[in-house]
Amino acid sequence: MIFNLIRSRVLACFIFISVLTPALAADTPVRGRVTGGVSHQAPAWFKESFLEIAEDVHEASDAGKHVILFFQLNGCPYCDRMLEESFETEPMTSYIREHFDTIAINIRGDREIAFNDEITVTEKQLAGILKVTGTPAILFLDENNKTVVRVNGYRAPERFRQILEFVATDSYQTTSLADYLDARLNKNVYKLRDNPLFSKISDLSAVDGPLMLIFEDGSCYDCDEFHDGILANPLVRKEIEPFTVVRLDADSDDRIIDIQGNETTPAELARKYEMIYRPGVLLFDEGLLLRRTDSLLFPHHFKEYLRYVAGGYYKQLDWRTYSDRRTEELLGAGVDIDLGRPRTD
């Protein structure tokens, strides 16, 4: 009898645990995954440097070339797209090889780099010194090992070709990149589109709450993708709700009032903020410029920029800390993070 009683209680306990366990499992979300990253090796023709950059610059200068430092990160979808479209596609490949020596640097790498006589550090330390916070970051060096142009993030091949020519022809010695691009880019590749998100406001100082300024013009190779793949994305639309969104024609001389209350024009404002990429985006809150996008951001990163500003997280956290914590928050809640290119279908 005692044996039967014990067996009954054990069986009851087993049944209770069996019933409870699925319920507990259901309350514990499966950790989310990061998708959309792309592993992309640098082209084989990139220079096999000993990472003595001053010497690389000297060799390039003797050959009538400039040095490109291509800062990348394993799995970076923007690096993948930039390499595929601008470094591995003709006639871009031949032009770059003719006029530049290109050196790949991993922003989290541990290889030792002698940047100049004073600086010998690891790849990741050099990235910190040069304030490389995103990839790709492309630095063009002159014969004195000085950065003459810096490209942060993805550029359409047509725009990147003009930057390459700006450096290869030494035009940086006589003019600004903004003026060079303005004189040479085709202004008929894009017609400014309406969007229900846009507010027709000419006095930016009157905006209450977060403000997004979008700069477009007729030379915007990426604007259609920005409208159809970024602004139309449901996750982006959710985070954009707190913003007043104003689109400015960067070629316009119409009179407007800037966020500080000064009279200006969209063209002057684009020059003031050095907006040489289209579409360029500035995010403000409480009169402060908090984030800028100088390249095409894919949906996840763009919507997190919006949340960082509109949610006021910038008041307590720098962007990198916020991004790391937010990533862990989403993954821990079982949310997948797609870093990939926007869908425009």
Image (cartoon, helix red, strand yellow):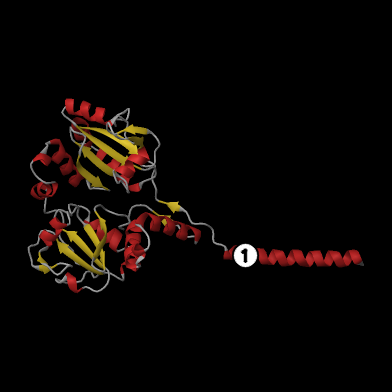
Q: Position of residue 7 (x, y in %)?
A: 84, 64
Kindly state the secondary structure of the residue where label 1 is placed.
helix
Residue sitting at the far front: 118
Q: Residues within 10 Å of mark 1 (few under 14, many from 20)?
A: few
Vertical placement of residue 56 versus 138, above or below: above
Of residues 317 and 139, the one nearer the viewer is: 317
Vertical placement of residue 97 versus 259, above or below: above
The residue that disc 1 covers is 24
At horizontal 11% and vertical 53% (from top left) the residue drawn is 187
The quadrant of the picture occupied by the C terminus is bottom left
Residue 40 shows up from this direction = no
Q: Position of residue 226 (x, y in %)?
A: 25, 58
- State the count of labels: 1
The quadrant of the picture occupied by the N terminus is bottom right
Residue sitting at the far right: 1
Q: Position of residue 127 (x, y in %)?
A: 32, 42
Q: Is residue 181 left or right of residue 114?
A: left
Kindly identify the amino acid type of the residue bearing the numbered disc 1: Leu
Vertical placement of residue 307 versus 135, above or below: below
Q: Is residue 309 left or right of residue 280?
A: right
Q: Position of residue 37 (x, y in %)?
A: 39, 48
Residue 30 shows up from this direction = yes
At horizontal 45% and vertical 60% (from top left) the residue drawn is 330
